[in-house]
Each structure stands twice: as structure tokens, then as C-alpha cells.
Amino acid sequence: MKMRLAASVAVTVLATTVLAGCQFITPQQTSRSYTPSDGVNGSVGSVQIRNVFLVDGEDDTASLIGVLSNTSATASEVTLQWTSATGIETKRLNLPGNGLLSISTDPSTPDASVPGSSASVILDDVDATPGSLFPVTFTASSKDEDLRLPVLTGSLSQYATLVPTPTPTPTKTKRTPEAEATDTASPTPTPTETLAG
């Protein structure tokens, strides 16, 4: 009886030791930080960058989508910088103290679930291929972070309204010289007096 009890205890201790050892050789997925969405996260100074990504549009355009959160009581300016076909492009956004800024294609219709103000950031002349990662640098409080933003399309229903539409360029109409008006009317006859004879 004592032998069986000792064997049971030994097997239990051995099994516990072996199973406990798994955590040392197998990484725990729950201890890894990851972004549970399509966008990426980051931070610069007191500004938290949350779920930012690009939605590809026509004519080499893309709209930046995401949320910026200012954890400081003082206002902060965030500078975004990227490379277009014509060179370095810059966009500046102002965040109020302890405020949120929702970045969307159409800032006049922000998502009701996101409090705070809204802004629009459209990237023109960029090679943002769907499925690729596009580099954008965020700068605030003399700190910067280079983020590689996923490029998505409007093929998914939740992103269909976020596709940027190209800004129409004004077309110049060529003026044609007006034909010179020629006076084709015959001169008005002057009345002649008939003399009675």
C-alpha cells in the first residue's frame, strides 16, 4: 500500500514538473503584445497612435485612417511625413489637451463611437499598393516613430466608404475667337422726292 502511494506521488510530481517545464520552452501567446485589428499602433511623446492604416484609392491616392489620443493636459501638434512621387510630403494635426482626433476620409461624418474632433489626411501621388506596408513618420514633442501602415482596399464592406475619391482638377475650356461680325445689311435707301410737273 505504501509502495503504491509513493509511486502515485512520484508520478504526480514528475508530471507536474514536466508540464510546468512547458512554459519555459514554449512561448506564451497571452504574454505577447499584438494589435487586434487591421491597423498598427505606436506612440510619440504624450500622443498615442491607434489602429492607423491606409485605404487605397484611384489615381495613386490613399486615405489615412486611425485615431490619435493626447494623454497630456496641454495641446500637442503631430506632424505626419511620407514620400510621394514628387518628394517629401508633410501634414500637421493639432490635438487638444486630453483630446482625441479621429482621422477619416470624410471628417464631416465621423464615427459616432469615436468622441472628439476629426480630420482628413489624403495622400496624393503615392505608390501605396494594396497588401503592402507604407512608411509614415509621426512626430510630436521632439520624438518620432516610423510606422509601416498596412494598405487596404474598399473591397471589404467596412472600408468601402473610406476609399478616397480623386479631387477633380479644373479643366480649362479653350476659347475660340468669335467670328467678326460683317455688316451684310444693305444701306437704307434715302427717300427721293418726286417733283410734280
Image (cartoon, helix red, strand yellow):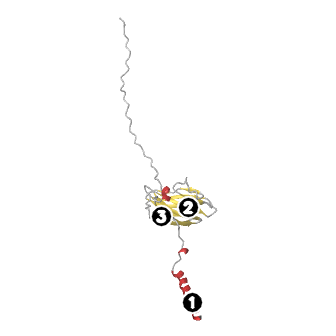
Q: Nearer the viewer, mark 2 or mark 1?
A: 1
Q: Which residue lies at the image location 59% right of the left edge and 62% below the top edge?
A: 69
In the picture of the structure, the residue carrying the numbered disc 3 is 150
Crowdedness of circle 1 by 10 Å Cα count: few (<14), some, many (20+)?
few
Label 3 with label 1: CB-CB less than 8 Å: no
Amino acid type of the residue tagged 1 in the rendering: Ser
Crowdedness of circle 2 by 10 Å Cα count: few (<14), some, many (20+)?
many
The numbered mark, 2 or 1, whose residue comes first in the sequence reads 1
Quote the CA–CA distance across marks 2 and 1.
Answer: 57 Å
Q: Residue 162, percent across and down?
A: 50, 56
**Quarter of the rendering occupied by the N terminus:** bottom right
Q: Which mark is residue 8?
A: 1
Q: Which residue lies at the image location 51% right of the left edge and 81% below the top edge?
A: 25
The picture quadrant where one finds residue 125 is bottom left
Left or right, residue 68 beside residue 185: right
Quote the CA–CA distance across marks 3 and 1.
Answer: 55 Å
Residue 78 higher or lower than 16, as above or below: above
Report the front residue among 117 and 17.
Answer: 17
In the picture of the structure, the residue carrying the numbered disc 2 is 67
Q: Secondary structure at mark 3?
A: strand
Q: Secondary structure at mark 2?
A: strand
Amino acid type of the residue tagged 2 in the rendering: Val
Q: How many marks?
A: 3
The picture quadrant where one finds residue 178 is top left
Residue 124 higher or lower than 41, as above or below: above
Amino acid type of the residue tagged 3 in the rendering: Pro
The picture quadrant where one finds residue 132 is bottom left
Report the front residue among 26 and 104.
Answer: 26
Left or right, residue 72 beside residue 59: right
